Image (cartoon, rainbow, N blue to C red):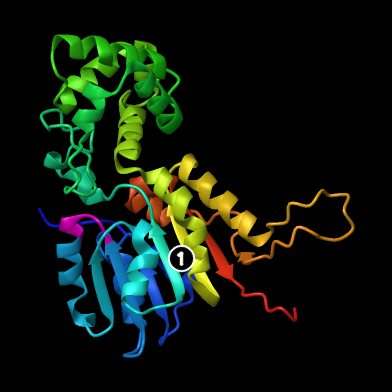
C-alpha cells in the first residue's frame, strides 16, 4: 500500500515557519513528507532539512518523495525525542525552524495490518508507530491491570465509561486473550450504553486513542521534550506544532505560554526577581484552524490546531 497522508494545513504551516532559503529546518514527524517537500523546495543549496520519523514505511516513502532534494535533505529513522542528539551528531547547534505534525497518519489508520483503526475488525491489535517496539496494543489490553486500563482510558481517551470498559476487558480476557480489533470492539460495545452508541459515534474511538497514546508514549515524549526543542531554535527561529486532540494542544499551549512568560514571582512584586528570562513570543494567540475547503476535502483535519512560537534570544544588555 502506497504511503498516502494528507498534509494538514499545509499552506498555513509553511507560511508560519517563514522558511529562509539558507536556513536549517527539522521536520520531527515526516510522515508522508508533504510538509517536508514544501520546506525543501524553498531551500537553496545552502539550506538544510532534517526529517525524522520512527515509521519504516514513512522513511521509505520520504526517501522517494524527497529524492529531488537529496542535496539538502537528511532523513533519520528515530523518534523526535532524540532531536537534540541527532542534530549534535550532524554538527548542528541550532536551527531556524521545527515542525511537529502530531498523532497518527492516514496511512497508519488505513493499513489494516497496522492495527490502529477500530474499523478493520479482522486486524490484529498492534498500533506501533515504530515496529521495532516489542510491545503492541495486544500486550497492553491483555496485561495491564484493571486500574491501569482505567487510568489510561480515562486520562488519554477522556471516556466517561472508562471504568466499565476496563472492568469488561479484564473479564473478557479471562475467557480468551483479546487479539483482534473485532474482539476488543465487542467488549467496548458491551460497556457503553446503547443510546450513547446511537448518538455518540463509534464507542471504541476514545479507547483506541488511549491505547495508541500509551503504547507510543505520545504525550510523555511531547511533554518531556518541547522545552528542549524551543532551546534548539536560533534567534528568530519558529516552532510550529499541529495537534489533533485537547491533551496534545494543552501541552503545546502551556509550554509556549511559559516560554514567553516564565516569571514565577508573585504578582504583587514590583519587579521580577526570579531571574527567569523569556525565550520568545507566541505567534498564535489563538490556534490556527483548517479552513472550510480543507475540512470538506479531509474530514480528519477537523480537530487539527496549529500553534506557533518564535524564539528570541535575550542578550544580557537587554
Give the vertical position of 257 relative to 122 (above or below).
below
| Residue under pointer 1 | 12
Check disc 1: other Cα within 10 Å, few if <14, some if 14-19, many if 20+: some
Q: Quadrant of residue 202?
A: top left
Q: Is residue 38 visible?
A: no
For image coordinates 40% across by 49% down, the residue present is 221
Image position, residue 316 (x, y; %): 71, 78
Please name whichever residue, 92 or 37, is drawn nearer the observer in this view of the structure: 92
For image coordinates 12% across by 57% down, the residue present is 2
As for residue 56 lying within the magenta part, the answer is yes
Q: Quadrant of residue 48?
A: bottom left
Left or right of 70, for residue 150: right
Please name whichever residue, 40 or 254, is drawn nearer the observer in this view of the structure: 254
Element under disc 1: helix
Q: Quadrant of residue 311?
A: bottom right
Residue sticking out furthest to the bottom: 45
**Start and end of the magenta stretch?**
53-58
Please name whichever residue, 2 or 309, is drawn nearer the observer in this view of the structure: 309
Give the vertical position of 308 relative to 186 (above or below).
below
Left or right of 170, for residue 294: right
Figure quadrant of the C terminus: bottom right
For image coordinates 22% across by 33% down, the residue present is 137
Amino acid at each position: 500500500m502506497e504511503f498516502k497522508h494528507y498534509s494538514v494545513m499545509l499552506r498555513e504551516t509553511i507560511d508560519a515557519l517563514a522558511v529562509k532559503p539558507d536556513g536549517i529546518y527539522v521536520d520531527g514527524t515526516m510522515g508522508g513528507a508533504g510538509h517536508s517537500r514544501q520546506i525543501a523546495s524553498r531551500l537553496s543549496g545552502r539550506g538544510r532539512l532534517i526529517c525524522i520519523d520512527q515509521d519504516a514505511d514513512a522513511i521509505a516513502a520520504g526517501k522517494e518523495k524527497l529524492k529531488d532534494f537529496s542535496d539538502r535533505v537528511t532523513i533519520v529513522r528515530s523518534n523526535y525525542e532524540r532531536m537534540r542528539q541527532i542534530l549534535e551528531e550532524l554538527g548542528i547547534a541550532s536551527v531556524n525552524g521545527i515542525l511537529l505534525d502530531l498523532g497518527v497518519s492516514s496511512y497508519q489508520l488505513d493499513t489494516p495490518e497496522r492495527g490502529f483503526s477500530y474499523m478493520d475488525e479482522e486486524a490484529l491489535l498492534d498500533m506501533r508507530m515504530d515496529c521495532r517496539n516489542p510491545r503492541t496494543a495486544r500486550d497492553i489490553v491483555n496485561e495491564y491491570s484493571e486500574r491501569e486500563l482505567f487510568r489510561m482510558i480515562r486520562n488519554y481517551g477522556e471516556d466517561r465509561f472508562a471504568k466499565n470498559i476496563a472492568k469488561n476487558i479484564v473479564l473478557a480476557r479471562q475467557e480468551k486473550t483479546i487479539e483482534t480489533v473485532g474482539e476488543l470492539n465487542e467488549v467496548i460495545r458491551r460497556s457503553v450504553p446503547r443510546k450513547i452508541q446511537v448518538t455518540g459515534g463509534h464507542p471504541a474511538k476514545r479507547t483506541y486513542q488511549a491505547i495508541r497514546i500509551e503504547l507510543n508514549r505520545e504525550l510523555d515524549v511531547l511533554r518531556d521534550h518541547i522545552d528542549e526543542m524551543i532551546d534548539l531554535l536560533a534567534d528568530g527561529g519558529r516552532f510550529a506544532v499541529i495537534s489533533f486532540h485537547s491533551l496534545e494542544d494543552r501541552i503545546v499551549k502551556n509550554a509556549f505560554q511559559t516560554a514567553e512568560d516564565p516569571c514565577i514571582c508573585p504578582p504583587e512584586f514590583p519587579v521580577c526577581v526570579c531571574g527567569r528570562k523569556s525565550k520568545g513570543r507566541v505567534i498564535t494567540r489563538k490556534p490556527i484552524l483548517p479552513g472550510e475547503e480543507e475540512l470538506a476535502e479531509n474530514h480528519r483535519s477537523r480537530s487539527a490546531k496549529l500553534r506557533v512560537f518564535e524564539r528570541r534570544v535575550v542578550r544580557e544588555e537587554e
